[in-house]
Image: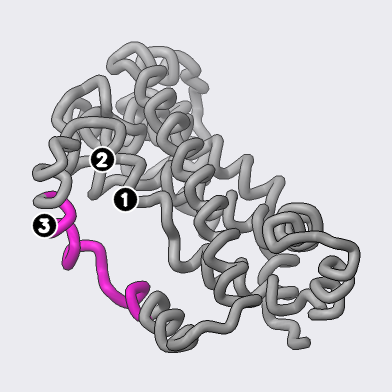
Amino acid sequence: MILPFYWMVLTAFKTPSEAISVPPTWIPSEWTFSNFSEAWSKVPWLKYFFNTALVAVFILAGNLLTSILAGFAFSNFDFKGKEKVFLLFLATMMIPMPVYIIPGYLILTYLNWIDTYAALIVPWTVSVFSVFLVRQHMKTIPRELWDAARIDGCGKFGYLWRIVVPLIKPALATVSIFSVVSSWNSFLWPLVVTNSKHLRPIQVGLAYFTQEQSTDYTLLSAAATFTALPLIVLFLFAQKRIINSFARSGLKD
């Protein structure tokens, strides 16, 4: 698993001739740091990073809000057809993206959202996986807390924001990490719904950069390195949160 990353990073420091040499070299004979500055100057990476960060933040906010509210409803309220509706939600996770790209594109065309930030953000503000994960965590909270909160005069929303949300921070941290990673790695959907260069997120920008520099493997490796670095750092800092969240989601009342 580590080998491709190692090869990518080391190739970013090689000269073009050494990058395609046979037999390959595992350590650069001449460290070339200028590949990063040259790759950065080829396309507006700063704009791509800004677009990706903007989209990721709004999608994260939407995911947290919808997953908390939906998870609270599915875990604490009893209504007719609750389990069937929840199973229907889960069933949508089995539908691959190519199936709903065309219907989604037609809906966005009708709304005049094509080539706008709304097309990149709004369809992804709800995540069924996030709803499922938050619901599982909420189900582990003792019912006695709700009864005690009602005795103290706390309403449903007060109980949710003051008691439930602080108790499910590991789940919310995992939802946040998964949402940011998914937004950062999103490629096919932004490629379909955007046309303008100023709206390209990082992965679409990297794909166009790959087409322009298809023969210079050092620049491609340098660009791939600094686009992947933020997620690698995020994962290294957050892996304990992810493991803790999945471990707790399997507990029963």
Q: Is residue 18 left or right of residue 228?
A: left
Q: Position of residue 163 (x, y in %)?
A: 80, 59
Identify residue type, mark 3.
Ile
The residue located at (63%, 57%) in the rendering is: 174
Residue highlighted by disc 3: 102
Instruction: Say few, some or many: other residues with alpha carbon within 10 Å of mark 2 (under 14 / 14 to 19 / 20 or more).
Output: many
Asked if the magenta segment contains residue 104, the reply would be yes
Q: Which mark identifies residue 119?
A: 2
Identify residue type, mark 1.
Pro
The residue located at (79%, 53%) in the rendering is: 162
Q: Position of residue 135 (x, y in %)?
A: 61, 72
Q: Is residue 245 left or right of residue 59?
A: right
Q: Which mark identifies residue 21?
A: none
Give the quarter of the image for residue 73.
bottom right
Predominant SS of the magenta segment: helix
Res. 4 visible in picture: yes
Q: Which mark identifies residue 123?
A: 1
Q: Position of residue 94 (x, y in %)?
A: 32, 77
* Cα gap from disc 3 to disc 2, whole angstroms: 13 Å
Identify residue type, mark 2.
Ala
Query: Magenta residues, as a range?
Result: 91-105
Q: Are marks 1 and 2 in contact (CB under 8 Å)?
A: yes
